[in-house]
Image: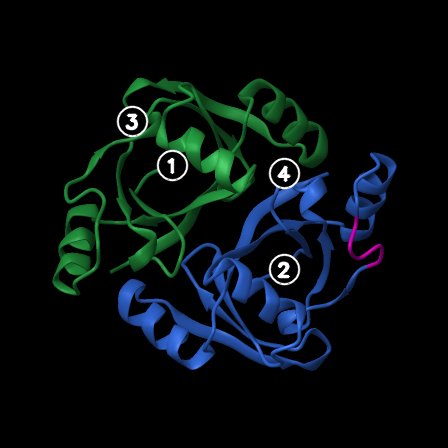
Chain colours: A blue, B green
């Protein structure tokens, strides 16, 4: 697999507006993309961090998986994302290794990128996203 | 604060050799730096990930803070690190905001870089490291 960069790191937060303001005040990062993602029952924002980015994710439904994650673990790191040059090839390689994929095929994520998630059991304890090439 | 990049993301792992081998097999990343850090009671390795890096940290003393973290939370994400161009200025800025700093002054971290840690209470639930400029 050819990982070309550490693409972004995501936090789960209870209130997206408050988190964007606080994150900006503390670390000086500003929003590049913000989207409601109804299928995932979250609203998400991507904040540019020079090279790399920070994603903030807030649940929009108290019954969603993200809301339960937030309730059980509190605000904090949620997933890590690597950029790869060929997502389909990377997924095929992981599957051949016996890795547990959440998305067996690329799907469209924040900002229109092709993405796929790997289960934490195959990600060294971390929910792991692969993002296909290009700028965030 | 001028964050120039997402410098690295760290995982805590129970066995550094096993984690380096497994991480390499799964994601194709290889070790750039490996160091015993007796003061922190850990051994750590930095794996280049194109732009950005992954740090793997294993406790070397079962009574250390890192060992207790691993025992209570399991293998997984441990901290996030941003690169800044002026670490002393960044720490002064955070202190003026009332942020809770673990290191009030820069100290030497993995690979000889000047680093400082911000408490998770001031890092949106994540232990947050600032690293002064330059390559990892």
> What secondary structure do most residues of the magenta stretch adopt?
loop
Residue A10 drawn at (x, y percent): 52, 60
Disc 3 and disc 2 on one polypeptide chain: no
For the question of whether residue B100 can be seen, the reply is yes
Nearer the observer, B70 or A114: B70
Alpha carbon distance from label 4 to label 3 = 26 Å
Neighbourhood count class around disc 2 (C-alpha, 10 Å): few under 14, some 14–19, many 20 upward: few
Q: Are marks 4 and 3 in contact (CB under 8 Å)?
A: no
Residue B122 drawn at (x, y percent): 29, 59
Alpha carbon distance from label 3 to label 1 = 11 Å
Q: Looking at the image, is mark 4 or mark 2 nearer the viewer?
A: 4
**A12 lies above or below B30:** below
Q: Chain of mark 3?
A: B
Residue B66 drawn at (x, y percent): 41, 32
Q: From the viewer's perspective, tell me whether residue B33 is left or right of residue B64.
A: right
First-in-chain label (4 vs 2) = 4
Q: Tell me the tag on residue B135.
A: 1
Q: Which residue is mark 3?
A: B112
Highlighted magenta segment, given as a residue range: A101-105
Helix, strand or loop at label 2? It is: loop
Neighbourhood count class around disc 3 (C-alpha, 10 Å): few under 14, some 14–19, many 20 upward: few
Q: Looking at the image, is mark 4 or mark 1 nearer the viewer?
A: 4
Alpha carbon distance from label 2 to label 1 = 22 Å
Q: Tell me the tag on residue A45.
A: none
Q: Tell me the tag on residue A124.
A: 4
Helix, strand or loop at label 3? It is: helix
Alpha carbon distance from label 4 to label 2 = 26 Å
Q: Tell me the tag on residue A134.
A: 2
Residue A57 drawn at (x, y percent): 54, 70
Q: From the viewer's perspective, tell me whether residue A125 is left or right of residue A39.
A: left
Disc 3 and disc 1 on one polypeptide chain: yes
């Amino acid at each position: 697999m050819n990982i070309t960069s550490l693409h972004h790191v995501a936090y789960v937060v209870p209130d997206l507006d408050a988190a964007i303001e606080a994150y900006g005040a503390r670390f000086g990062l500003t929003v590049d993309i913000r989207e409601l993602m109804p299928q995932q029952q979250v609203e998400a924002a991507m904040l540019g961090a020079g090279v790399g980015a920070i994603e903030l994710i807030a649940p929009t439904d108290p019954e969603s998986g993200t809301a339960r994650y937030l309730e059980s673990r509190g605000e904090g790191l949620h997933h890590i994302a690597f950029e790869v040059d060929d997502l389909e090839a990377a997924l095929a390689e992981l599957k051949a290794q016996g890795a547990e994929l959440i998305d067996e095929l690329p799907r469209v994520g924040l900002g229109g990128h092709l993405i796929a998630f790997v289960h934490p059991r195959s990600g060294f304890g971390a929910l792991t996203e692969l993002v296909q090439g290009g700028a965030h």
